[in-house]
Amino acid sequence: DTGVSQNPRHKITKRGQNVTFRCDPISEHNRLYWYRQTLGQGPEFLTYFQNEAQLEKSRLLSDRFSAERPKGSFSTLEIQRTEQGDSAMYLCASSLSAGAGYEQYFGPGTRLTVT
Amino acid sequence: AQTVTQSQPEMSVQEAETVTLSCTYDTSESNYYLFWYKQPPSRQMILVIRQEAYKQQNATENRFSVNFQKAAKSFSLKISDSQLGDTAMYFCAFMKSYSNYQLIWGAGTKLIIKP
Protein backbone atom coordinates (compact mmCIF):
# COMPACT_ATOMS: atom_id res chain seq x y z
CA ASP A 1 0.00 0.00 0.00
CA THR A 2 1.59 3.21 -1.16
CA GLY A 3 -0.86 5.67 0.36
CA VAL A 4 -2.95 8.29 -1.37
CA SER A 5 -1.47 9.61 -4.60
CA GLN A 6 -2.38 12.70 -6.57
CA ASN A 7 -1.44 13.78 -10.08
CA PRO A 8 -0.20 16.12 -11.24
CA ARG A 9 1.67 17.60 -8.30
CA HIS A 10 1.80 21.02 -9.90
CA LYS A 11 -0.31 22.59 -12.62
CA ILE A 12 0.09 26.03 -14.15
CA THR A 13 -2.70 27.12 -16.44
CA LYS A 14 -3.99 30.24 -18.05
CA ARG A 15 -7.24 31.79 -16.95
CA GLY A 16 -10.16 30.31 -18.85
CA GLN A 17 -8.58 26.91 -19.43
CA ASN A 18 -9.96 23.66 -18.04
CA VAL A 19 -7.90 21.49 -15.71
CA THR A 20 -8.38 17.99 -14.32
CA PHE A 21 -6.74 16.45 -11.28
CA ARG A 22 -6.62 12.80 -10.31
CA CYS A 23 -6.62 11.14 -6.90
CA ASP A 24 -5.90 7.48 -6.23
CA PRO A 25 -7.00 6.57 -2.69
CA ILE A 26 -5.76 3.76 -0.50
CA SER A 27 -7.20 0.68 -2.14
CA GLU A 28 -9.49 -0.55 0.63
CA HIS A 29 -10.84 2.90 1.51
CA ASN A 30 -14.40 3.48 0.36
CA ARG A 31 -14.60 7.16 1.32
CA LEU A 32 -12.86 9.86 -0.63
CA TYR A 33 -12.73 13.59 0.09
CA TRP A 34 -11.56 16.67 -1.77
CA TYR A 35 -10.38 19.77 0.09
CA ARG A 36 -8.96 23.08 -1.08
CA GLN A 37 -6.21 24.86 0.84
CA THR A 38 -5.10 28.41 0.16
CA LEU A 39 -1.82 29.80 1.41
CA GLY A 40 -1.73 30.28 5.14
CA GLN A 41 -5.13 28.72 5.73
CA GLY A 42 -6.53 25.40 6.79
CA PRO A 43 -8.17 23.18 4.19
CA GLU A 44 -11.81 23.71 3.22
CA PHE A 45 -14.11 20.82 2.40
CA LEU A 46 -15.22 20.59 -1.22
CA THR A 47 -16.91 17.22 -1.73
CA TYR A 48 -17.13 13.64 -0.51
CA PHE A 49 -17.74 10.24 -2.07
CA GLN A 50 -18.76 6.98 -0.54
CA ASN A 51 -17.83 4.38 -3.10
CA GLU A 52 -18.97 5.87 -6.42
CA ALA A 53 -21.72 8.06 -4.95
CA GLN A 54 -21.04 11.75 -4.44
CA LEU A 55 -22.89 12.34 -1.18
CA GLU A 56 -22.15 15.95 -0.42
CA LYS A 57 -20.89 19.06 -2.14
CA SER A 58 -19.85 22.25 -0.40
CA ARG A 59 -21.34 25.56 -1.46
CA LEU A 60 -17.71 26.43 -2.28
CA LEU A 61 -17.98 24.07 -5.22
CA SER A 62 -19.36 26.29 -7.96
CA ASP A 63 -20.86 25.00 -11.19
CA ARG A 64 -17.42 25.19 -12.76
CA PHE A 65 -16.23 22.37 -10.51
CA SER A 66 -17.15 18.75 -11.03
CA ALA A 67 -15.90 15.61 -9.37
CA GLU A 68 -16.35 11.98 -10.26
CA ARG A 69 -15.39 8.64 -8.82
CA PRO A 70 -16.23 6.02 -11.40
CA LYS A 71 -16.35 2.47 -10.06
CA GLY A 72 -15.56 3.73 -6.60
CA SER A 73 -11.81 3.73 -7.16
CA PHE A 74 -9.86 6.79 -8.32
CA SER A 75 -11.46 10.22 -8.44
CA THR A 76 -11.10 13.21 -10.72
CA LEU A 77 -11.74 16.87 -9.98
CA GLU A 78 -12.28 19.10 -12.99
CA ILE A 79 -12.32 22.87 -12.97
CA GLN A 80 -13.74 24.53 -16.05
CA ARG A 81 -12.96 28.08 -17.17
CA THR A 82 -10.38 28.55 -14.43
CA GLU A 83 -10.14 31.87 -12.60
CA GLN A 84 -7.24 33.34 -10.65
CA GLY A 85 -9.18 32.74 -7.46
CA ASP A 86 -8.97 29.01 -8.12
CA SER A 87 -5.22 29.09 -7.41
CA ALA A 88 -4.76 26.82 -4.39
CA MET A 89 -3.58 23.44 -3.22
CA TYR A 90 -6.18 20.75 -3.91
CA LEU A 91 -5.98 17.94 -1.38
CA CYS A 92 -7.48 14.49 -1.64
CA ALA A 93 -8.02 12.21 1.35
CA SER A 94 -9.47 8.76 1.84
CA SER A 95 -10.78 6.78 4.78
CA LEU A 96 -12.59 3.67 5.81
CA SER A 97 -16.29 3.95 6.51
CA ALA A 98 -15.94 2.80 10.09
CA GLY A 99 -13.37 2.35 12.75
CA ALA A 100 -10.08 4.05 13.52
CA GLY A 101 -11.95 7.25 14.35
CA TYR A 102 -12.62 7.75 10.65
CA GLU A 103 -9.03 8.82 10.19
CA GLN A 104 -8.47 10.50 6.85
CA TYR A 105 -5.23 9.84 4.99
CA PHE A 106 -4.09 12.65 2.75
CA GLY A 107 -2.28 12.76 -0.54
CA PRO A 108 0.50 15.23 -1.32
CA GLY A 109 -1.88 17.60 -3.09
CA THR A 110 -1.99 19.27 -6.48
CA ARG A 111 -0.87 22.89 -6.51
CA LEU A 112 -2.80 24.89 -9.10
CA THR A 113 -1.57 28.25 -10.30
CA VAL A 114 -3.86 30.20 -12.62
CA THR A 115 -2.10 33.01 -14.50
CA ALA B 1 -22.22 25.58 12.09
CA GLN B 2 -19.01 24.41 13.65
CA THR B 3 -15.92 26.61 13.80
CA VAL B 4 -12.35 25.92 14.87
CA THR B 5 -10.01 28.65 16.10
CA GLN B 6 -6.25 28.50 16.49
CA SER B 7 -5.12 31.73 18.07
CA GLN B 8 -1.37 31.28 17.66
CA PRO B 9 -0.26 31.91 14.06
CA GLU B 10 3.36 31.06 14.81
CA MET B 11 5.42 29.66 17.68
CA SER B 12 9.06 28.80 18.08
CA VAL B 13 10.88 26.86 20.79
CA GLN B 14 14.30 25.37 21.35
CA GLU B 15 14.90 21.72 20.63
CA ALA B 16 14.03 19.46 23.61
CA GLU B 17 11.62 22.00 25.11
CA THR B 18 7.92 21.41 25.63
CA VAL B 19 5.41 23.43 23.62
CA THR B 20 1.63 23.70 23.78
CA LEU B 21 -0.54 24.67 20.82
CA SER B 22 -4.02 26.01 21.48
CA CYS B 23 -7.29 25.19 19.77
CA THR B 24 -10.86 26.13 20.61
CA TYR B 25 -13.98 25.10 18.78
CA ASP B 26 -17.63 25.92 18.73
CA THR B 27 -20.34 23.31 18.29
CA SER B 28 -23.73 22.35 19.63
CA GLU B 29 -23.04 18.68 18.96
CA SER B 30 -22.34 16.24 21.77
CA ASN B 31 -20.73 13.50 19.69
CA TYR B 32 -17.71 14.41 17.64
CA TYR B 33 -14.03 13.81 17.03
CA LEU B 34 -11.12 16.20 17.31
CA PHE B 35 -7.83 15.85 15.51
CA TRP B 36 -4.41 17.42 15.30
CA TYR B 37 -2.75 17.13 11.91
CA LYS B 38 0.82 18.05 11.02
CA GLN B 39 1.84 19.43 7.63
CA PRO B 40 5.65 19.60 7.24
CA PRO B 41 7.01 22.01 4.62
CA SER B 42 6.15 20.75 1.12
CA ARG B 43 4.90 17.46 2.51
CA GLN B 44 1.53 15.92 3.06
CA MET B 45 -0.84 16.20 5.98
CA ILE B 46 -0.25 13.57 8.66
CA LEU B 47 -2.49 12.70 11.59
CA VAL B 48 -0.76 13.37 14.92
CA ILE B 49 -3.44 12.50 17.44
CA ARG B 50 -7.19 11.93 17.72
CA GLN B 51 -9.71 12.43 20.53
CA GLU B 52 -13.25 11.11 20.75
CA ALA B 53 -15.50 13.56 22.56
CA TYR B 54 -17.21 10.86 24.62
CA LYS B 55 -13.89 9.83 26.15
CA GLN B 56 -12.86 11.79 29.22
CA GLN B 57 -9.31 10.49 29.16
CA ASN B 58 -6.90 12.66 27.20
CA ALA B 59 -5.30 10.97 24.19
CA THR B 60 -1.55 10.37 24.15
CA GLU B 61 0.76 9.28 21.35
CA ASN B 62 4.39 9.06 22.42
CA ARG B 63 5.63 12.68 22.82
CA PHE B 64 2.26 14.12 21.82
CA SER B 65 -0.65 14.55 24.21
CA VAL B 66 -3.81 16.60 24.32
CA ASN B 67 -5.67 18.51 27.00
CA PHE B 68 -9.33 18.08 26.08
CA GLN B 69 -11.71 20.30 28.02
CA LYS B 70 -15.17 19.51 26.62
CA ALA B 71 -17.10 22.08 28.65
CA ALA B 72 -14.67 24.81 27.68
CA LYS B 73 -14.52 23.52 24.09
CA SER B 74 -10.75 23.53 24.21
CA PHE B 75 -8.36 21.01 22.66
CA SER B 76 -4.68 21.86 23.09
CA LEU B 77 -1.71 19.83 21.86
CA LYS B 78 1.39 19.37 23.97
CA ILE B 79 4.63 18.29 22.35
CA SER B 80 7.26 17.11 24.81
CA ASP B 81 11.00 16.87 24.11
CA SER B 82 10.51 18.72 20.82
CA GLN B 83 12.65 17.65 17.88
CA LEU B 84 13.78 19.43 14.72
CA GLY B 85 11.48 17.14 12.72
CA ASP B 86 8.49 18.58 14.57
CA THR B 87 8.87 21.79 12.58
CA ALA B 88 5.62 22.05 10.60
CA MET B 89 2.20 23.64 10.34
CA TYR B 90 -0.15 22.13 12.89
CA PHE B 91 -3.88 22.11 12.22
CA CYS B 92 -6.67 21.41 14.64
CA ALA B 93 -9.74 19.82 13.04
CA PHE B 94 -13.28 18.90 14.08
CA MET B 95 -15.48 16.12 12.74
CA LYS B 96 -19.13 15.66 13.62
CA SER B 97 -20.12 12.07 14.28
CA TYR B 98 -22.79 10.40 12.14
CA SER B 99 -22.39 12.93 9.37
CA ASN B 100 -20.55 13.23 6.10
CA TYR B 101 -17.34 13.05 8.10
CA GLN B 102 -15.90 16.19 6.62
CA LEU B 103 -13.15 17.83 8.62
CA ILE B 104 -13.56 21.45 9.68
CA TRP B 105 -10.18 23.05 10.14
CA GLY B 106 -8.51 25.83 12.04
CA ALA B 107 -6.15 28.23 10.29
CA GLY B 108 -3.09 26.46 11.64
CA THR B 109 -0.09 27.25 13.84
CA LYS B 110 3.38 27.36 12.31
CA LEU B 111 5.74 25.66 14.76
CA ILE B 112 9.47 26.18 14.42
CA ILE B 113 11.89 24.08 16.46
CA LYS B 114 15.26 25.78 16.77
CA PRO B 115 18.50 23.81 17.25
Image (cartoon, coloured by chain):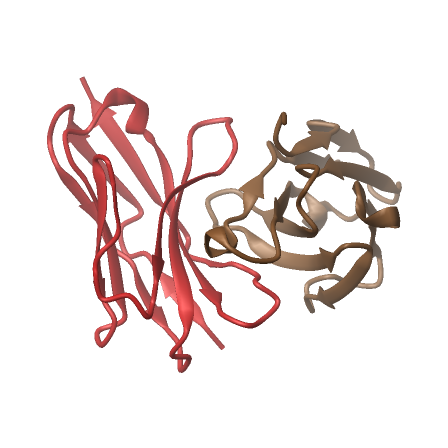
Kindly identify the residue that appears in the image at 74 percent across and 66 percent down: A55
Task: Give the number of marks.
Answer: 0
Tell me where residue A27 sits by quadrant.
top right
Give the residue drawn at x 50%, y 28%. B43
Quadrant showing the C terminus of chain A: top right
Q: Is residue B36 above or below residue B7?
A: above
Chain that is coloured brown in the picture: A
A83 with respect to B36 (left or right): right
Q: Is residue A108 visible?
A: yes
User: Residue sitting at 44 percent across and 27 percent down?
Assistant: B41
- For chain B, the rendered hue is red
In front of the other: A113 or B41: B41
Q: Is residue B2 above or below residue A102?
A: below
Residue furthest to the bottom in view is B28
Image-quadrant location for residue B29: bottom left
Q: Against A49, is A111 above or below?
A: above
Quadrant assignment, res A16: top right
Residue B47 image offset from top left, x and y in percent? 43, 42
User: Residue at (51%, 55%) from the top-left corner?
Assistant: A99
Q: Position of residue A1 (x, y in %)?
A: 63, 27
